[in-house]
Image (cartoon, helix red, strand yellow):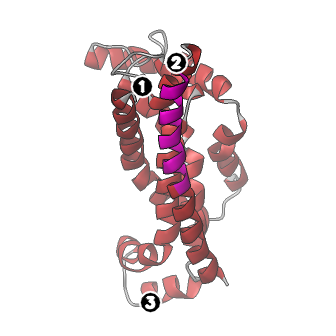
Amino acid sequence: MDWTALWLSLRLAGWTVVFLLPVSVLMGRFLAYRQFRSKGLVEALVMLPLVLPPTVFGFYLLVAFGRNSPLGDLWQGLFGSQLVFSFQGLVLASIIFNLPFAIQPAQRGFQAVPAEVREAAACCGMSPWRSLWKVELPLAWPGVVTAMVLTFAHTLGEFGIVLMVGGSIPGETKTIAISIYDRVQGFDDRGAAIMSAVLVAISLFTIAVTFWLSSRVGRRLS
């Protein structure tokens, strides 16, 4: 069992969830309540990582994060290190690639909040931020939690983006998914089987939690 790779994957998934939680809440709420001309385009851009092959998406991220790109050059100037093939680059790539998993369930959660409840909060003199914290989030939390659970689990098992942007540097960018691949390539079936079983167990738990939370959201919609 490659504990270093598992710990790195857990760190990557944890930081991705931390950064995407506010994005999930704010963007999910915005898309749930606002109607504007280009809303369909915005939703399509959010969902784009779901339909693009990870290697294609990873290639564009690799170009965007490279030293010759504005972002890569800025990062090099600020921190003295390159963004690609680093843990920080993996976190940024993971945040972008997991936007659909973070935003869409939260959007569905906020859409489940009855409009009259929000109107009542406004009539009581609540500011939009107070209404979000005191009224909307307590009702939309199943969708937000589902988003975070899916984001965490998807990050743990991601392979293509991680390999393209981070490579396979032990202790830095070599996640458990890449470690499993390396074990298979090295004919270490037992090691690959153990690590795969760990990911299967995490995935099964994630699916169970997601279905339970989805049923909560469904009951609110009915």
Left or right of 52 on screen, residue 15: left
- Residue 84 place in picture, x, y as percent: 44, 17
Question: Magenta stretch: dominant SS?
Answer: helix
Quadrant of the image containing the C terminus: bottom right
Closer mark to the observer between disc 1 and disc 3: 1
Closer mark to the observer between disc 2 and disc 3: 2
Q: Which mark is residue 182?
A: 2
Q: Earlier in the sequence, mark 1 or mark 3?
A: 1
Quadrant of the image containing the N terminus: top left
Q: Amino acid at mark 3?
A: Cys
At mark 1, the secondary structure is helix
Q: Which residue is mark 1?
A: 89
For the record, the magenta segment spans 188-204
Q: CB of mark 2 within 8 Å of CB of mark 3?
A: no
Q: Earlier in the sequence, mark 2 or mark 1?
A: 1
Q: Which residue is mark 3?
A: 123
Q: Amino acid at mark 2?
A: Asp
Q: Amino acid at mark 1?
A: Gly
- Residue 10 place in picture, x, y as percent: 38, 40
At mark 3, the secondary structure is helix
Q: Residue furthest top?
A: 68
Residue 6: in magenta span: no
At mark 2, the secondary structure is helix
Residue 196: in magenta span: yes
Q: CA distance from mark 2 to mark 3?
A: 60 Å
Q: Residue furthest front?
A: 190
Q: Around disc 2, counting alpha carbons within 10 Å, would you say few (fewer than 14), some (14 to 19), or many (20 or more)?
A: some
